[in-house]
Amino acid sequence: MQENQVVIDAIINGDKVKAAEQSPRENPTRPDEIVGYAPVNTREETVQAIDAAYDAFPDYKKMPVDERIERMRKAVQTIKDRTKEISELISREHGKPLYDSEGEIGVSIAWMEFACENAKEVLKNEKKEHESGKTIITRDPIGVVSAITPWNYPLSLSTIKIAPALLAGNTMVLKPSPLAPLAVSKVLEMIADEFPKGVLNLVHGDSDVGVELTSNPKVAKIAFTGGTGTAKHIMKAAADTIKKMTLELGGNDASIVLDDFDVNDEKAMRRLVISNYLTAGQICMIAKRIYVHRSIYDQFVEKYIEAANKWIRVGDPFNKDVTIGPVNNKKQVDYVQSLVDDAKGKGAKVIKLGEVLDEDVFDEGYFMQPTVVLGANYDDPIVSEEQFGPTVPILPFDDDEHAIELANDSIYGLTSSVWGEEKHATDVAHHIQAGTTMINTAAVQGLDVRFPFGGVKQSGVGREYGTEGLLAYTDTHVINIPKNGDLPYIPE
């Protein structure tokens, strides 16, 4: 085993548990390099983790919220102190540039701190006195939460679940993606160390582990971020025990560029480019299709390509000049390339963007040079499907109603953006079917952890972030204390 390889174990009831089988995680920049190993846990080990969380819950839910907050703050400080180590590991196993990994840690910390700052107020009992008596409304913990998280933002999409679940008094079992399991497991260990045994457990594995996490009767809530197709299986698995769910799913997020958008605004154009290609386009909320008013279409395309060529520099994630690293895995490369090839085969024009800084590195890893696709049909897969990679189609529209119709013509509704004069853009935004619509910005650039985030239609169920993200891990319990228990309209 190489000196810099990372070996991860499961965490069950506070103990590190070695698995009989381990799965290697390659470096997508240099696929011959193994960054580390994660366990392949069995279904039986997953049951043990769920049982540990279930047994820990009765005592943990009694812990005062002030103590839960203090423990979480200590974990946050540890993460801050080890930011360099964590960010480098994310870049090695995931492929995103170092600045992007550091940004992901920053978002995670910002959310965890927001949750700590607001948990006591959000979770406190609400007491009301009224003419018929008193009512107490409590926010009770739900029980055991199973969390299944993806590879694209492994740390932030795990802490978005861990912080509110534990602060609310729940216990948890979390399973990361095998495509980016290492850094998030390190962080989870830092958090678990601050809490009693069994409160936060970690397992890795394949579909057998996922099935147990979503069907076990001791699991009270499922928190999942990932594909819509997988979510449908999860909902079926959870149906027998009517589990609560928070599902943040796929998106095919539209950007609408209105006729009053200033194509010469270099900063706005740069924000739009970044909203398409950050993390090599592998973000659920990234802008994946651009609709531009026909009157400015040609000018827009010219200025867009100019802005993209200035910002996009493809290469090794540890090169400080790089803005885009490799795609995370070969399967995703093949899928994205198939969409581009399909559009090109149907007559679309595909234009490569930016600069490849090192051809040898590019050829070795899972790299794709970003592309823009012009002249695609509105119903081509490059437009109608979620690419989740470094390519984007730009298409014209005729008027606001046409743009709204095109944006809403999707099974998805995660985020969207409208670009133009603020009032005009806001008026259009009100008609978009999405969980979040941003004005003159998009994707992570417009994310604010103080406010709820989630999708409509097949992009999800429930909300994360904001106070809603805290309340999502509670049951509302109403205690009524009437002055007189008799109903006035029932005769004696």
Image (cartoon, helix red, strand yellow):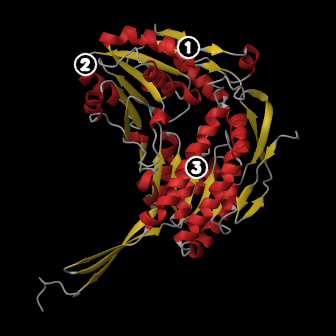
Q: Nearer the viewer, residue 112 or 183?
A: 112
Q: Nearer the viewer, residue 115 or 39?
A: 115
The part of the image, by quadrant, that contains residue 389 is top right
Q: Amino acid at mark 2?
A: Asp
Tell me if 373 is positioned left or right of 34 in this view. Answer: left
Label 3 to label 1: alpha-carbon separation: 32 Å
Q: Which residue is mark 3?
A: 109
Tell me if 93 is positioned left or right of 442 in this view. Answer: right
Q: Earlier in the sequence, mark 3 or mark 1?
A: 3
User: Of circles 2 and 3, which is in front?
Assistant: 3
Q: Residue furthest bottom?
A: 492
Residue occupying image coordinates x 72% and y 65%: 14
**Label 2 residue SS:** loop
User: Of circles 2 and 1, which is in front?
Assistant: 1
**From what the image shows, is residue 99 above or below residue 164?**
above
Q: Earlier in the sequence, mark 2 or mark 3?
A: 3
Q: Which residue is mark 1?
A: 309
Q: Amino acid at mark 1?
A: Asn
Residue occupying image coordinates x 40% and y 40%: 458
Residue 37 showing in the rendered view:
yes
At which x and y percent is residue 221?
A: 50, 59
The part of the image, by quadrant, that contains residue 359 is top right
Q: Quadrant of the N terminus?
A: top right
Label 2 to label 1: alpha-carbon separation: 29 Å
Q: Amino acid at mark 3?
A: Ile
**From what the image shows, is residue 135 above or below residue 317?**
below
At which x and y percent is residue 122?
A: 42, 63
User: Badge 3, how many Cα within 10 Å: few under 14, some, many 20+?
Assistant: many
Residue 43 showing in the rendered view:
no
Dot 3 and dot 1 residues touching (CB under 8 Å): no
**Label 3 residue SS:** helix
